[in-house]
Image (cartoon, rainbow, N blue to C red):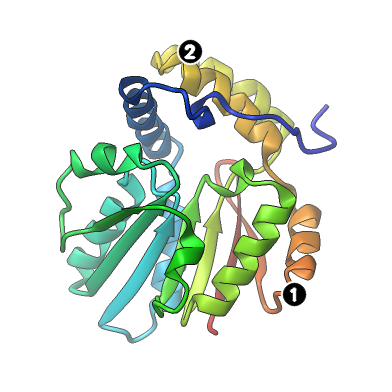
Amino acid sequence: MLAERLQADELMDDPALDAGTYHAVLADLAKVNRITLAYRPTLDFLRRALGGRTRFRLLDVGFGDGDMLRRIALWAQRRGTEAELTGIDLNARSIAAAERHPSPGAPIRYLAGDYADLAGERFDFIVSSLVAHHMTEDQLVRFLAFMDAEAQAGWFVNDLHRHRLSHFGYPLLARAMGWHPIVRLDGTTSIARSFRAPEWSALLRQADVRGARVRRYFPFRLCVEKIGP
């Protein structure tokens, strides 16, 4: 089990899901992110990649509830760094979910659509969180190539590690926390759909990306980064 990546859809990706349920799922996913320290890898990347910059432009692909962008805005505000933040999500209902929460820093621009439509905008950084495992391998190869071509200072993929312990442990945590049934069910699917380090290396080769690094973060995060053009 888990030797190969699961090929299956997640319930939250069903376009027929009503807006109320979708927003409730996103709200609980933001709680999952807080409890599982999901923001730490992305903020660690930005800290290392920012260098001496006093301002930066960042794109978050698949922003969902917008919680990662709000955390980045708060982090930049505390550093005294000017951040111009944009999120794009294929699901237009994510905009209403994200805009319910005020940004702690500068206003965040939320867009609906395909990230590829933003080619040429010259973002310093492109990031994603818990999005890669929703993609097929072909989609992910295109996404890696897009980030490598478009990110001026670096990019970061924050995703799960397909690991037996997290696969069996997550349902216990989700049940104890009383999260939405879709969040409980999709969580184990997400873990089974995620990648292992050798698979990431193969995807990077297919995308013709050089200089990227696969990094592990506690707990059960497997992230991919590139700092520099």
Question: Where, quadrant-wise, is the N terminus in this rendering?
Answer: top right
Find residue 120 and name its label.
none
Give the CA separation, mark 1 to mark 2: 41 Å
Residue, x 41% and y 41% (percent of image)?
Answer: 91
10 or 81: nearer the eye? 10
Residue, x 31% and y 46% (percent of image)?
Answer: 66
Query: Does label 1 or label 2 sit earlier along the sequence?
Result: 2
Question: Where, quadrant-wise, is the C terminus in this rendering?
Answer: bottom right
Coordinates of residue 35 in the picture (x, y in percent): 40, 34
Residue, x 63% and y 65% (percent of image)?
Answer: 144
Quadrant of residue 87 within the rendered picture: bottom left
Quadrant of residue 134 within the rendered picture: top right
Tell me if 45 is positioned left or right of 221 in this view.
left
Task: Report which residue position mark 1 lands on.
Answer: 208
2 or 21: nearer the eye? 21
Task: Report which residue position mark 2 lands on.
Answer: 175
The local crowd at label 2, few if under 14, some if 14 to 19, many if 20 or more residues have their Cα within 10 Å, is few
34 or 159: nearer the eye? 159
The local crowd at label 1, few if under 14, some if 14 to 19, many if 20 or more residues have their Cα within 10 Å, is few
- Kind of element beneath mark 2: helix
Seen in the picture, residue 135 relative to 76 is either above or below; the reply is above
- Kind of element beneath mark 1: loop
Residue, x 51% and y 19% (percent of image)?
Answer: 184
Seen in the picture, residue 102 relative to 179 is either above or below; the reply is below
The type of residue carrying mark 1 is: Asp
The type of residue carrying mark 2 is: Arg
